[in-house]
Image (spheres, helix red, strand yellow):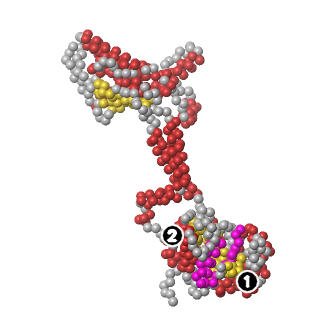
Amino acid sequence: MMFNRPRPIDVTSRLWRVNEAQSEVAGDGPIALVRALIALGTSHKVPLSVCCGAGLLVAALYAHSLPPTYQATATILLEPRQSAVSGGEPAQQILDLNRADSELQTIRSERLLSAVFESLNLQDNPELGRQQPSLIGRLVNGFGLRLGGQNEADGAKIDQSEPVEDRANIEHANEADRAAFINFMSRLNARRVGQSFVIEIEYSASDPKLPARVANATVSGYIYQTVAFKEQIARAGTEALQGRLDSLARQVDAARDAMHEGALPAIATPDADARIIGAALPPLGPSAPRKSLIIALGGVVGMLLGFGVVVIRMALDRRVRSAKELARETEILCLGSIPDVPGAEGVPWRITSPQQQKFVAAIRDLRTSVEIACTSLRNEKSIVIAVVGWTPGAGVSTLCTGLSQLISRSGRQVTLFKAADGDDVLASDVNLPALSLAGAAFAGLMPEQLSFEDVGGIAVLPIHSKDANANLFSDFRNPRVRRIFEAARSRGDVILDLPALRHSMDAIALASYADAVLILARAGKTTIEEVSESVQLLRRAGANVVGTVINRAGR
């Protein structure tokens, strides 16, 4: 006599831990997230590899399609000098941070940059030509034209007496020059080095020789403006010395010529309040695009897109994958997971491979789980176990055969009521025996009139008959069918290999005779909704669904 016997569901829950609540400590935190990502990447390595490779390929093609960009940088140091103007005492010039910012804005001014732009004849440079606007830009411009009409040109005034074609050509030329100058300004960058008085002038272009010319010409233009201003002050003085004027004039000429040539002044310019500490040199190699960085980013983006594709596929894919997922989605215990072993049709007498050993161990564990789940039903009497799937090909016959063989080899009598594969051709299958459960119910035979086929110590009786009339007109709810099952139960355990629920309602009628019903789901084929619908159909018919089983799970 057993006291404090746990309920079947409690015992099964202890045996199968897929339904147990996971620890909050182990399921939260960054470590759990990393583990989940690693598991996700391992289980979906093929689509992730494809997406990552596609990202790398696209990034590599994009990086190689970009033209090379060269940069050159000229460096000057703001350094005010003492100067004597108008024959007086030397004037002390003080340079502070505010004035350094003012000089930086002078270098960035449109007046200085336009002088450099014109002196180097960059208005005809094809690289600085007017860029084609993007699709969004064209849409915005078109929308603005509809609302506000034509924009007024910012160029020089045009004589209205000129012909219309000449005015259009002039406007187009002015717009092209203006667009080239704006593009030129966007490529030139002048900045201070920290809070020091050092200013770096940098220019980028696809021509390897042009950046150094532009950077040096900008430095020379700044020196030219500074020295020219002092020259004008000196000339305005009534007592200016001729030597001082000549020195300033030479510095002005040298700075002007250097600006036009895209070089630095050939002579020293002590009155420029700036000392050149670094001339712009032609770059040895392109500074952009950074192809390795682009390719690496492409790989990262491809991997992220791959994870996104995997997540979307997982969200849309409702097929059964694991016991834990099946138990969580259906809220029914998953009692077993049968591995995918090619060619396995039952329990062999001699195990010759590790795959067969895993298959037999899974069948044995399933039998133990069913026995525990049916502890309250089995004392000393036999039980009836039914296995059913939603569609044909789930492996119900193989599973029932394996269970019957294990029970038989443990010393118990077992009877197997077997359904043929392919329920839509049962009526015309000539291989079916003449005597069957459907035929016995149709003919009104008594249990003692039935003869079971002995297959390896298992009494086997087909459920359907080769007689079409017997299959169509037999009633499995007939009391004669119940007496047949009771007679088989009196001899030992009974295994019902039921036809697929999707194609036959006979499975629902026969499942009501079973003490325990197992729903078999094929991994990667059967969906969660199909398992849930099978549970609802069977329970509405009064069947005792004790759990689910996954067949052909991953190795």
Q: Is residue 42 visible in this depiction of the protein?
A: yes
At mark 1, the secondary structure is: loop
Residue pointed to by mark 1 = 451
Along the line of sight, which residue is nearer the eye, 86 or 494? 494
Name of the residue lying farthest toward the right = 469
Q: Please say whether residue 419 is one of the residues in the magenta stretch.
A: yes
Query: Do labels 1 and 2 touch, CB within 8 Å?
Result: no
Residue shown at 56%/27% (left/top)?
A: 150
Name of the residue lying farthest toward the bottom = 1
Q: Which residues are magenta?
A: 397-422
For residue 303, side relative to residue 474 (left or right): left
Residue pointed to by mark 2 = 18
- Above or below, 182 against 331 in this view is above
- Above or below, 207 against 490 in this view is above
3D distance between C-alphas at marks 1 and 2? 43 Å
For residue 187, side relative to residue 325 (left or right): left
Q: Please say whether residue 410 is one of the residues in the magenta stretch.
A: yes
